[in-house]
Amino acid sequence: SFLRGIRDLGYKSNSYAIDELIDNSVQAGATEINVLLPQKSNKITDIILTDNGHGIPSGMLPVCVAWGGTHRQGSKSGWGKYGYGLPSACVSIGQKYTIYSKVSDKDTNIDGSSIDGGWHSITVDLKSALTDEKFDPQKVFSDVNQIDFLPEDINDELSLKNIDVKSLKSGTIIHITNLDKIKNQYPVTKDNFIEDFGTTYYDMFPQVKITVDGDLVEGIDPCFATPGLKYYHSKENNVSGGT
């Protein structure tokens, strides 16, 4: 009942849900964030988000997929205080998602011990939970797995957009599949993402680079009053002089 309810949490749009994931990437110090929308005949089959942030230690992956799981409870700076954004955003779009994350081999735990570097993954699959079967958490939440290579389908999609994950010293990839709550199809969803991300994160450019399916997101000041941002020079804007 909880999982069915949380899926209908009420994001205004799919792009607002992805904003939750981008927030996490920015919080993790990412300077490059890519959102990919693989599709067939304009039907989006999955969503992939990549970033070059500091990554998630393997021991934290089970915490990340648990509602209320966070190491920032009570923090008064930045975002992500309560640990609801990542799992809620992912399941509001699809029934299954996998997190692949890698931390730098140079990182250490709070106690000074070394962190297990390399790629690790965890999968959340709601299929069994959304049926009438008796709820079994082990069918929904996988164990954390250490992997030597990313799955071939992920690598293929990243290669198509010239995203080189081999060069990443750290970072995170979120792969949402079994999509059943996409409100629009391609390319409408892509265009909506570009407009929303441009408006939401305009004051973070160019320090943070965001692309959607290979297209660079341009900043959009909601007041159209910032020189150099998208639409500032449009005829409809009719901006006059002044500070």
Image (cartoon, grey):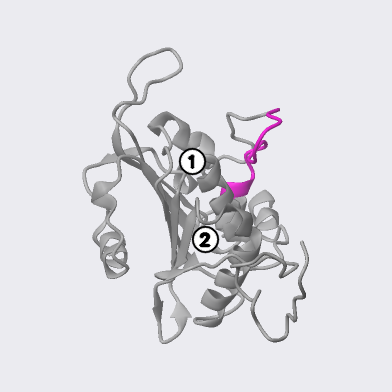
- What residue sits right under mark 1 in the picture? 29
* Residue drawn at x 64%, y 37% as measured from the top left: 68
Q: Seen in the image, is 159 located left or right of residue 18?
A: left
Q: Identify the main secondary structure in magenta.
A: loop
Identity of the amino acid at label 1? Gly
Quarter of the image for residue 34 reads bottom left
Identity of the amino acid at label 2? Gln
Mark 1 → mark 2, Cα distance in angstroms: 28 Å
**Residue 88 included in the magenta stretch of the image:** no
Residue 201 location in percent, x, y? Answer: 61, 57
Q: Residues within 10 Å of mark 2 (few under 14, many from 20)?
A: many
Q: Quadrant of the C terminus?
A: bottom right
* Residue drawn at x 66%, y 36% as measured from the top left: 81
Front one among 69 and 24: 24
SS of the residue under disc 1? loop
- What residue sits right under mark 2 in the picture? 95
Which range is magenta? 74-87
